[in-house]
Image (cartoon, rainbow, N blue to C red):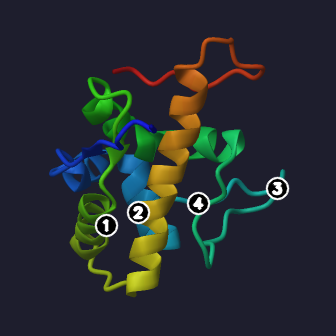
Amino acid sequence: MAPKAVLFTDLKGLCHAWDADQNLRTRMRTHKRLLLEKPPAGQEPEPSTNSVSKTAENVRYNVLALRPLVKRMSSARSATACIETLTAEVLAFHESHGFNPGIKVVSDEAWGLRYLMGCLKNVMWKKNPPRETWPHIVV
């Protein structure tokens, strides 16, 4: 029998943590997105029309957005972030900058956070060491 999935819902206030970071505020004003795909070398990032890909490069590129989430979930390694709570926090972050994004943008960013967190957790808590260097996320 598979273990029961545990949802982590104590995510209220993530929007304030993101807003405390000058780089994330600049990203939001410039690109109107919390998460961005890592652009090819020499190119500027552009907002995606979908959720960011679950890749090591995107984890590194979006480490500032992931850091508060990792801090919150550090005591619940086996839990999964609640998508409804993430959606509410992403929406609050957009609205705090005066944007009224569509539900698709908010949903894609919430799922993107969850995907990237899963990618990070998969590498951080595996028994084997990672093959690539990963960003240091101070918890």
User: What type is the residue that disc 2 sits on?
Assistant: Ala
Say whether residue 33 is visible.
no
Residue count near mark 1 (Cα–Cα under 10 Å), binned few <14, some 14–19, many ≥20: many
Say whether residue 96 is visible.
yes
Which circle marks residue 87 in the picture? 1
In x, y percent, where is residue 48? 63, 73
Residue count near mark 4 (Cα–Cα under 10 Å), binned few <14, some 14–19, many ≥20: many
For label 4, the residue is 36
User: What type is the residue that disc 4 sits on?
Assistant: Leu
In x, y percent, where is residue 56? 68, 39
Cα distance in 3D space between marks 2 and 1 = 5 Å
Q: Earlier in the sequence, mark 1 or mark 3?
A: 3
Residue drawn at point x = 20 percent, y = 49 percent: 9
Residue count near mark 3 (Cα–Cα under 10 Å), binned few <14, some 14–19, many ≥20: few
Q: Earlier in the sequence, mark 2 or mark 1?
A: 1
State whether residue 127 is above or below residue 94: above
The kind of secondary structure element at disc 3 is: loop
Q: Earlier in the sequence, mark 4 or mark 2?
A: 4
State whether residue 6 is above or below residue 85: above
Residue drawn at point x = 33 percent, y = 21 percent: 139
Find the residue positioned furthest to the right. Answer: 41
Which circle marks residue 110 in the picture? 2
Callouts 2 and 1 close, C-beta under 8 Å: yes
For label 3, the residue is 40
- In the displayed structure image, the side of residue 126 where residue 26 appears, left or right: left
Q: Earlier in the sequence, mark 2 or mark 3?
A: 3
Q: Nearer the viewer, residue 44 or 58?
A: 58
The kind of secondary structure element at disc 2 is: helix
Residue drawn at point x = 42 percent, y = 47 percent: 65
Residue count near mark 2 (Cα–Cα under 10 Å), binned few <14, some 14–19, many ≥20: many
The kind of secondary structure element at disc 1 is: helix
